[in-house]
Image (cartoon, rainbow, N blue to C red):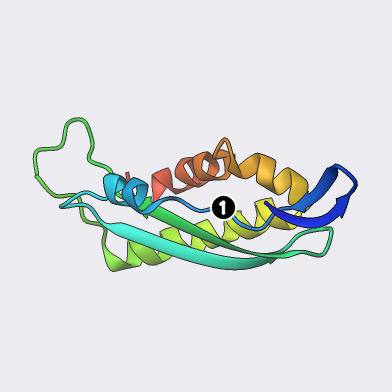
Amino acid sequence: LCIEEVQGRNCLTDFHGMSLTRDKVYSLMRKWHTLIEAHADVKTTDGYVVRLFVIAFTKRRADQVKTNCYAQSAQIRKIRKKMVEIMTKEAGTVQLRELVKKLIPESIGKEIEKQTQGIFP
């Protein structure tokens, strides 16, 4: 949040940005897994242009014998396309206030995980 205006003892704030810390991102990364990144510029219904970044990782299955779980490049392209599609759909139909409320519980991330399950198991 950043302060836009001060009215007496009250501060009017506006959403400025939200990001993961460096140590959180590094704790998510693993060896022998594929890292998939995507970004999209989305215009919300109240006129704000928001740049969203998504980071995804492949996951080993419970019955998997191989030590690595790499995705093929065609699967990565499909997953990235689906991630951008979901981001634009979710963020383009709401106002900035509702978008921030969606980002905090990671509901967009859960939707992406559910939709891309068929591309890379």
Residue ID at (60%, 44%): 103
Residue 85: give x, y in percent of width and height: 58, 60
In the visual, does 11 lie left or right of 25? right
Q: Residue at x 50, y 53 (%)?
A: 19
Residue drawn where x is 56% and y is 52% of the image: 18
Dot 1: few (<14), some (14–19), or many (≥20) neighbours within 10 Å? few
Q: Quadrant of the C terminus?
A: top left
When asked about the image quadrant of residue 42, the answer is bottom right
Residue farthest along the top direction in this orientation: 62
Q: Nearer the viewer, residue 18 or 84?
A: 18
In the rendered image, is residue 31 in sight?
A: yes
Q: Residue 88: x percent and y percent?
A: 65, 60
Q: Quickly name the residue at label 1.
A: 18
The amino acid pointed to by label 1 is Met
Q: Position of residue 9 (x, y in %)?
A: 86, 42
Kindly tell me whether residue 94 is visible in this rendering: no
From the viewer's perspective, is residue 61 above or below residue 41?
A: above
Quarter of the image where one finds residue 47: bottom right
Taking the image as shown, residue 56 lies to the left or right of residue 112, namely left
What is the x, y in percent for residue 36?
36, 60
Residue 26 vs residue 9, the one in the foreground? 9
Side of 36 relative to 5 (left or right): left
Q: How many marks?
A: 1
Q: What secondary structure is found at the residue carrying circle 1?
A: loop
Q: Is residue 41 left or right of residue 54?
A: right
Residue ranking furthest to the right: 8
Residue at the image point whose x is 68% and y is 54% from the top:
91
